[in-house]
């Protein structure tokens, strides 16, 4: 499949930055987005019992907040929790725990595997129904994370990678262009002979296209050489040195080579995966020296709070990480 636009981590940071800054429309989101209509719809459909949602997102009449109201509530509550010593905000947990542990896991597999190949598969879906109307964010999340999709994807991936040692971490993030949940699965593979190719990965993506309603091939294009698109891989993964996201330096957790016991470099794909954690952008929102992130990211972060689905999923062999 050709890929002229899509997901990036293998050496295409310029395009990656453009998408993250909200200057582009991500795959599967509509080109002409009616943000007003989208933000007026409820966060969840009427069939969802509002009593099952976190209290901040319920209205006094028992209805569910709109997408716009939910983002405002999210920002307000998270800022309040951020400033309290007795509460760990979702932002703090992502910043100081999960973000750092993704980097640590990456360095572990660089050390553990004799011939590391890394790969990323991205699963997307359209936020519009067959009539062109917006699905609620809750419905998009249900479709993306249905057990049928997850189980068929995992079984197929294991079938094609069964002769290799491999582990993975999956991170769900909202799109910058419409807050639509989508999932990146980053895979570390022990591949000393560099035999991994698109054929080892494409069948798992095909299961997503088969079993996830609103997932379409046109939004999951990729190149056969694995350099670009919804499937990417590298036999000699690009690395970056000691890095930080503006408000947090990984050095705080691992200041020296000796303390880590592993060379202090991270693959570019792992850094990208970590940067997609849904509760990181709020720091830039309240930092006057940083560009304000797209509002859709906070609408998506509110969704990640109310959903029962995990937006962070490691395989069982990833050290130090749990749901």
Image: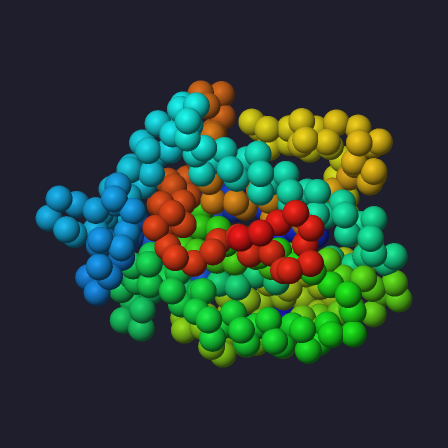
Q: Is residue 177 left or right of residue 312?
A: left
Q: Is residue 69 above or below residue 223?
A: above
Q: Is residue 310 left or right of residue 97?
A: left
Instruction: Name the residue located 83 percent from the left edge and 48 percent from the top edge.
Output: 111
Q: Position of residue 177 (x, y in %)?
A: 42, 49
Q: Most extreme residue toward the left, as rendered?
A: 61
Q: Position of residue 267 (x, y in %)?
A: 73, 46
Instruction: Name the residue located 83 percent from the left edge and 56 percent from the top edge.
Output: 113
Q: Is residue 35 above or below residue 264?
A: below
User: Which quadrant does the N terminus fall into?
Assistant: bottom right
How many numbered marks appear?
Answer: 0
Q: Is residue 316 visible?
A: yes
Relative depth, front residue between 3 and 310 = 310
Relative depth, front residue between 274 and 308 = 308
Colouring convention used in this rendered image of the protein: rainbow
Q: Position of residue 253 (x, y in %)?
A: 68, 31
Relative depth, front residue between 274 and 257 = 257
Q: Most extreme residue toward the top, as rendered?
A: 288
Q: Is residue 45 left or right of residue 223?
A: left
Q: Is residue 76 above or below residue 120?
A: above
Q: Position of residue 171 (x, y in %)?
A: 54, 53
Instruction: Name the residue located 38 percent from the left edge and 41 percent from the top edge.
Output: 298
Q: Is residue 282 visible?
A: no
Instruction: Name the residue located 36 percent from the left edge and 45 percent from the top edge.
Output: 302
């Amino acid at each position: 499949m050709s890929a002229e636009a899509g997901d990036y981590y293998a050496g295409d940071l310029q395009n990656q930055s453009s998408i993250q800054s909200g200057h582009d429309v991500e795959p599967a989101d509509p080109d002409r987005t009616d943000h007003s209509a989208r933000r007026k719809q409820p966060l969840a459909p009427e069939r969802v019992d509002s009593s099952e949602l976190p209290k901040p997102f319920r209205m006094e009449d028992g209805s569910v907040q709109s997408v716009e109201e939910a983002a405002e509530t999210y920002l307000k509550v998270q800022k309040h929790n951020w400033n309290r010593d007795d509460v760990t905000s979702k932002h703090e947990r992502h910043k100081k725990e999960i973000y750092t542990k993704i980097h640590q896991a990456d360095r572990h597999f660089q050390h553990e595997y004799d011939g590391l190949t890394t790969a990323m598969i991205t699963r997307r879906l359209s936020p519009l129904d067959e009539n062109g109307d917006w699905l609620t964010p809750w419905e998009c999340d249900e479709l993306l994370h249905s057990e049928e999709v997850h189980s068929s994807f995992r079984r197929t991936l294991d079938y094609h990678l069964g002769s290799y040692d491999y582990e993975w971490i999956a991170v769900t993030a909202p799109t910058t262009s419409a807050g639509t949940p989508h999932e990146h699965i980053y895979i570390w593979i022990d591949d000393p002979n560099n035999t991994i190719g698109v054929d080892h990965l494409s069948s798992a993506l095909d299961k997503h296209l088969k079993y996830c309603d609103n997932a379409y091939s046109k939004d999951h294009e990729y190149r056969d050489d694995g350099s670009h698109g919804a499937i990417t891989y590298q036999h000699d993964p690009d690395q970056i040195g000691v890095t930080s996201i503006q408000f947090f330096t990984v050095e705080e957790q691992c200041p020296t080579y000796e303390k880590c016991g592993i060379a202090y470099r991270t693959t570019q794909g792992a850094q990208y995966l970590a940067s997609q954690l849904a509760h990181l952008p709020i720091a830039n929102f309240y930092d006057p020296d940083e560009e304000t992130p797209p509002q859709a990211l906070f609408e998506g972060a509110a969704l990640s709070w109310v959903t029962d689905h995990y937006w962070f999923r490691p395989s069982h062999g990833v050290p130090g990480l749990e749901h």
